[in-house]
Amino acid sequence: MKALYLAFLNSWRGLVHGARTERAIRLELLLLVLGLPAALLLGQTLWVRVALLAGLLLMLCAEFLNTAIEKLCDHLHPGRHDRIGIVKDLASAGAFASQALAALIWLAAVIDRF
């Protein structure tokens, strides 16, 4: 039980640090906060509501991983480096794909509702 608690504290520290230091994470946290009541109102069934929130959470997860990769790359190679740039671009593309997926889920829910 103690290990689970310590793992939670590590995750909480990461969430707080990301929210304090990264604009993209703050924006996606705001989308999640605004999306929660919107999903409850927009979703007609439990599974639509779950899908709406899962899309936002997936987007936030990808942004945290993208940020972690960028910070690690910057730590290992602070200067400009072509290969490091490709790694960072790939991580960014993953975050973008998750944003597109979240948008697709929300668009489908809006179309289905109206």
Image: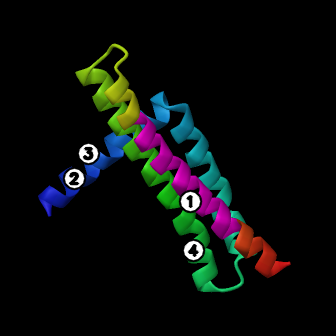
Callout 4 environment at 10 Å: few (<14), some (14 to 19), or many (20+)? some
Q: Residues within 10 Å of mark 1 (few under 14, many from 20)?
A: many
Disc 3 from disc 1: Cα separation: 22 Å
Magenta-tinted stretch = 88-106
Q: Is residue 90 placed above or below 101 in the rendered structure?
A: above
| Label ID, residue 10 | 3
Q: Amino acid at mark 4?
A: Ala
Residue 39 falls in image quadrant: bottom right
Mark 1 or 4, nearer chain start: 4
Question: Considering depth in this image, is 57 or 15 the residue closer to the camera?
Answer: 57
Q: Which residue is mark 2?
A: 7
User: Whole-percent x and y of residue 94?
Assistant: 46, 50
Q: Which residue is mark 4?
A: 51
Query: Residue at left 58%, top 62%?
Result: 101
Do the residues under discs 3 and 2 have CB atoms within 8 angstroms?
A: yes
Residue in the picture at 37% in, 32% down: 70
Q: Is residue 101 left or right of residue 68?
A: right
| Secondary structure of the residue carrying numbered label 1 | helix
Earlier-in-chain disc, 3 versus 4: 3
Quadrant containing the C terminus is: bottom right
Give the number of the mark in front: 3 or 1: 1
- Decide: is 107 above or below 62: below
Mark number, residue 56: 1
Q: Position of residue 24 (x, y in %)?
A: 55, 37
Q: Amino acid at mark 3?
A: Asn
What amino acid is labelled 2 in the image? Ala
In-front residue for pair 77/111: 77
